[in-house]
Amino acid sequence: MSNAGSETGAGAQAGALLAVLPEVPRLPDRSVVQLAFPHRERYAEMVQAFRDAGFETCADLCAVDYLTHPGRSLPDGVKAERFEVVVNLLSLSMRQRVRIRVQVPEGDPVVSSLVDIYSGTEAMEREAFDMMGIIFEGHPDLTRILMPEDWEGHPLRKDYGVGRVPVQFKEAPGPR
Amino acid sequence: MSEHDEDTEATDTEPDTEAEGARTVGTSRHLAEAAALNAETSEGAQELMDRSSTGAGELRREVGAVLRLPEGNFVNPDDIDIERRDDDTMIINMGPQHPSTHGVLRLMLELDGETVLRTKPIIGYLHTGMEKTGEELTYVQGATNVTRMDYLSPLTNELVFSLATEALLGVELPPRAVWIRMLMAELQRVSSHLMWMATNGMDLGSTSMMIYGFREREMVLAFFEKTTGLRMNHNYIRPGGVAADLPDGWQDDVDVICDTVMARTFEYDELLTGQPIFRERTEAVGNLTAEEALALSVTGPILRSTGVPWDLRRTMPYLDYDKLDFDVIVGTYGDNFDRYSIRLNEIRESIKMIRQIADRMPVGDYRVQDRKVTPPPRARIDESMEALIHHFKIFTEGFRVPEGEVYVAIESPRGELGCYMVSDGTSKPYRMHIRGPSFVNLQALPVLLRGGLMADAVAIISSVDPVMGEVDR
């Protein structure tokens, strides 16, 4: 673990921050980086609270499809869903990272967008939408970013048929 | 700018007196053809739409979106000229084959004469699904995949992948492996920044700088070839250490590289830094504030150019960077010139670090002596049955990594290079996400370009230093 530089640092401050949101389930202090598991309805609210508490920038946002690996360790009170949106926030002033993992159900893959809180998540959310099919509510321009506009399916999903499409053709532009 | 561009034809309705006669004859046919061509080549909603198809609210929102800034925060809605008629402005397409877009970056620019109003980077032309591929390769094979992402600094990609794997494994590296990694990572930074100096010089019309930059970079690549066997895409840094020990006489090679490149940086000073034309073209061009940079998640030299002293080697040390003496270079104005001088001075800082590393390189193993993680030496396979089994298992099945997830970030030449890795306990990563600094930094482009001149666009794109392999992955 000593080589994972990003995982080190005093966790006390972020711990104090998490105490602000006591009802958010979280795993016990794992490798110092704080993990939080808000419900998706409280997710944007929580990110906003972190931003107000001094996490100036959102380092990373990505989605994970847990279709074939459902038995991951989650704290009590968090219901495992198929998708997870993982947000890494970074505080430059406190030299702290915090990781927020939100459960997103398969039938309704919608979470609120963070663009209004961290503008830098714009491209990352588009990528998560493109690759995983997570819909970010309130995103100003939720279109595909890496794949062609008329591509069917979301390639990083575990049930995506690799090699299913032999050649790609382009037709009329997709709906805005 | 691509001159024969269908989108331009379709949207450019500027009255042209000379072509007026010819145009009236075949207008309808011309328009129909243009529309058909447009439909055929358009990427649809990914593109920047023209003003006629965007309402006032939509335009404000789009400017907010395109600038990647929340409206209330930085963009004053009154500044957005929604009354402007379509024929005052022109949407042109730059790339993806434009030589100055450093790969296959495509930009749609809305221009008012020479001034850039809106910009939208369109990416994905080099998307090869490397994150998906990463899920199909074992941890042993994975480094060959990630090394192809940021092809100008492949070793940093391997480093972040290996650090993430080792964090999940809980492996402690021998000191020599750590220091070899630091040595290679800093040499990589030198070569990457030299390459940037070269291409940036070329974009600003200094062809000599292009030749010089490539010449010096070649020295570093020759050393990489000697050490790793390949000039690029080395697969040298692997989970558990590095692939091979440094070659005999490596100190001499490193000394020569350090002395030569250090001396040459002062030649670059003479060639570019004090040169009036270069300064005119870079100073106060493409300004960015610290608030904008942080809001846009921008990292690396671009963030530091705005005066934020954020360098992961210093602020969140990994490897043994906390044992080295170096300075974090910061700028003041966040303009092109600051980004240039930061990279030039980072070359010098890296050389300073390389000299310290070469002096203090510990002796010992260059990889973990755990046969479950690193393959046995070739000679042992002939003698020991156990070594043969380990060798076979590692190269067929790979090693199993305990369940868990981890995010590791390092400072690549372009900014924060992160790896989010999820393991389900098998020998392949369940999910391997790379946070590419270029991908995120590209979001700053619309802000940097806004209100500037078209002639500066090339210089600004260059100063962001995007590597499309990493943007699209």
Image (tube, rainbow, N blue to C red):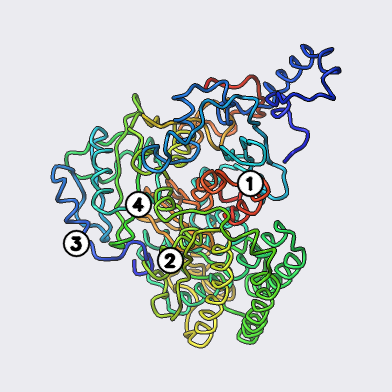
Q: Residues within 10 Å of mark 1 (few under 14, many from 20)?
A: some
Q: At numbered mark 3, what does the secondary structure look like: helix, strand or loop?
A: helix
Hey, what amino acid is under mark 3?
Ala
Mark carried by residue B311: 2
**Residue B161 appears in the figure:** no
Q: Name the mark on residue B214.
A: none
What is the CA distance from the residue labelled 3 to the residue labelled 2?
22 Å
Picture residue at 52% right of the left edge, 23% below the top: B54
Instruction: Specify few, some or many for label 4: CA neighbours under 10 Å numbering under 14, 14-19, or 20 or more.
Output: some
The tag earlier along the polypeptide, 1 or 4, is 4
Residue visible at 63% across and 36% down in the picture: B111
Q: Residue under mark 4: which chain is it in?
A: B
Q: CA distance from mark 1 to mark 3?
A: 48 Å
- Asked if disc 3 and disc 4 are in contact, CB closer than 8 Å, the reply is no
In the rendered structure, which amino acid carries the disc numbered 1? Leu
Q: Mark 4 and mark 2 in contact? Answer it, CB < 8 Å.
A: no
Question: Which amino acid type corresponds to the residue marked 4 in the rendered image?
Answer: Glu
Q: CA distance from mark 1 to mark 4?
A: 45 Å
In this figure, which residue is indicated by the disc labeled 3?
A12
Residue B405, numbered label = 4
User: Residue B453, which numbered label?
Assistant: 1
Residue B342 picture location, percent across and down: 54, 67
Q: Is residue B394 left or right of residue B127?
A: left
